[in-house]
Image (cartoon, rainbow, N blue to C red):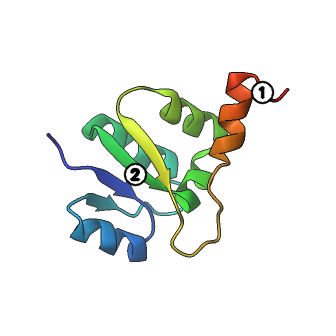
Amino acid sequence: MPAPIFLGDELAAAGYRLAGAQVRTPPPGEAAAALAQACAQSSLVLLSADLAAQVGAAALKRALATPAPLVLVVPDIHGRVPLPDLAARLRAQLGFEA
């Protein structure tokens, strides 16, 4: 099984590298391409919240909705970009909110 791939900044990447993940720190403007490449190479892609904001809403939604590979947005180590509100999303999908 291929190692998980982490996409994000260098500081967070150091920790994920220690945990055994392959890490990539795409330059500005190349987040969507890096995500597509990681999805083609691993069964688990960890995407920092900061980089997820750079990917674009449509590409991110598509990556999160696809059953394989599993794509997860992880907290931004600097706290600049908040994580998506998963509870609100689930309530809306279940029909609890209009």
**Foreground pick, 79 / 62:** 79
Q: Quadrant of the C terminus?
A: top right
Give the secondary structure at mark 1.
Answer: loop
Mark 1 or mark 2: name the one nearer the start of the chain: 2
Q: Is residue 80 left or right of residue 5?
A: right
Residue 30: give x, y in percent of width and height. 49, 53
**Residue most toward the top?**
95
Seen in the picture, residue 18 relative to 96 is either above or below; the reply is: below
Q: Quadrant of residue 58?
A: top right
The residue carrying mark 2 is 46
Q: CA distance from mark 1 to mark 2?
A: 29 Å
**Foreground pick, 8 / 70:** 70
User: How many C-alpha atoms fall within 10 Å of the one at disc 1: few (<14), some, or many (≥20)?
Assistant: few
At label 1, which amino acid type do we have? Phe
Seen in the picture, residue 98 relative to 64 is either above or below; the reply is: above
At label 2, which amino acid type do we have? Leu
The residue carrying mark 1 is 96
Q: Residue, x 57% and y 61% (percent of image)? A: 50
Q: Is residue 81 left or right of residue 47?
A: right
User: How many C-alpha atoms fall within 10 Å of the one at disc 2: few (<14), some, or many (≥20)?
Assistant: many
Give the secondary structure at mark 2.
Answer: strand
- Is mark 1 in CB contact (under 8 Å) with mark 2? no
